[in-house]
Amino acid sequence: MNHILLVAATPFEIAPTLSYLQENWAPHPSSAKEVGKNRTSAGQQTDLNAPVYARGSNEQKQEQTLFHKGETELKVLISGVGLTATAFALGRASNTNPYRLAIQAGIGGALDPSLALGQLVRVASDRFADLGAEDQDGSLIDLRELGFMPEGSNSPFNPDGTLSPMDEQSQASLIDLPFVAGISVNKVHGSTTSIERLREKYPTAQVESMEGAAFFYACNVMGWPALQLRSISNYVEARDKANWTIKEAIASLNEGLIRLLDVLA
């Protein structure tokens, strides 16, 4: 059995793909069961397999997350928004079977003006772009510059502080897309001053997200080949939601994602 993991921050971003899976793949038998129950201090039960961002009743049943087609099993993991939620969700997913491929799919902002709104790209490298210390002039001293970056053959990081997927050449052959350099942040940039500072710090960065670096980090630590897909919903500029094209970006993202899943099945 080939095990594939599909990760998205929100179900909204991959809604068309979820519909496609429900119509064209079969639900995995275990998805219909309430599993992974754990007692709370109050004696109630909570579902450890529910989306990690979920709030509300502890009696809520887990959602359908497993599908299969032929010899391929696909798990859909809605991680929640941000680096912390992504890292936690993937860490919890590491208790399952090793994955032949982990895919992260989402929308993102473009720092590179040559990228078109709605364009689908493959993120070939990513980095934590706001993790470190603030210098006296307000600039960032990142982990590598602070001397806190893990080094050696077991480090998930490249020497320059970036993260890239294992077996990148093989994964790139699965889908023919432009490849870009990404950055990941806890707070997306929305002012001219901070954007200019970002461009000065990381001049090769082309796209911005809130999850990608955590995804690559977790996959590298766990030994999973990884593929990150991003569709451009907006340019990283002074914040103006009127200029965003989220609908078009989601359509482009899911068109490419469904095409990829057809190849993998």
Image (cartoon, helix red, strand yellow):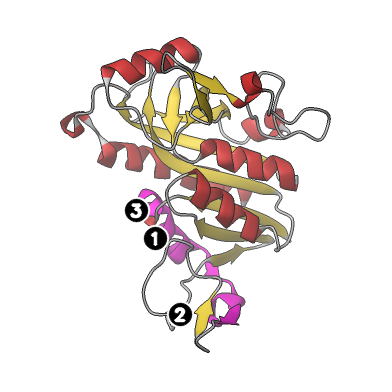
Mark 3: which amino acid?
Phe
Q: Is residue 25 above or below residue 213?
A: below
Identify the residue at the far right of this view: 153
Q: Nearer the viewer, residue 139 or 231?
A: 139
Q: Secondary structure at mark 2?
A: loop
* Residue 194 in magenta stretch: no
Category of crowding for the residue at label 2, using alpha-carbon neighbours closer than 10 angstroms: few (below 14), some (14–19), many (at least 20) = some
Position of 24 compared to 246: left or right?
right
What percent of the width, then of the height, locates residue 100?
A: 71, 49
Mark 1: which amino acid?
Ser
Q: Secondary structure at mark 3?
A: helix
Q: CA distance from mark 1 to mark 2?
A: 20 Å
What percent of the width, then of the height, locates residue 233?
A: 32, 33
Q: Quadrant of the N terminus?
A: bottom right
Whichever of labels 1 and 3 marks the residue nearer the N terminus, that label is 3
What is the magenta range? Answer: 13-39
Name the residue rendered at 16%, 32% in the picture. 242
Identify the residue at the far front of this view: 136
User: Residue 66 falls in which quadrant of the image?
Assistant: bottom right
Tell which tag, 1 or 2, sits nearer the viewer.
2
In this figure, which residue is indicated by the disc labeled 3? 12
In this figure, which residue is indicated by the disc labeled 1? 19
Q: Nearer the viewer, residue 108 or 260?
A: 108
Tell which tag, 2 or 3, sits nearer the viewer.
2
Q: CA distance from mark 1 to mark 3?
A: 11 Å
In this figure, which residue is indicated by the disc labeled 2? 61
Q: CA distance from mark 2 to mark 3?
A: 20 Å
Category of crowding for the residue at label 3, using alpha-carbon neighbours closer than 10 angstroms: few (below 14), some (14–19), many (at least 20) = few
**Residue 257 has which mark?**
none
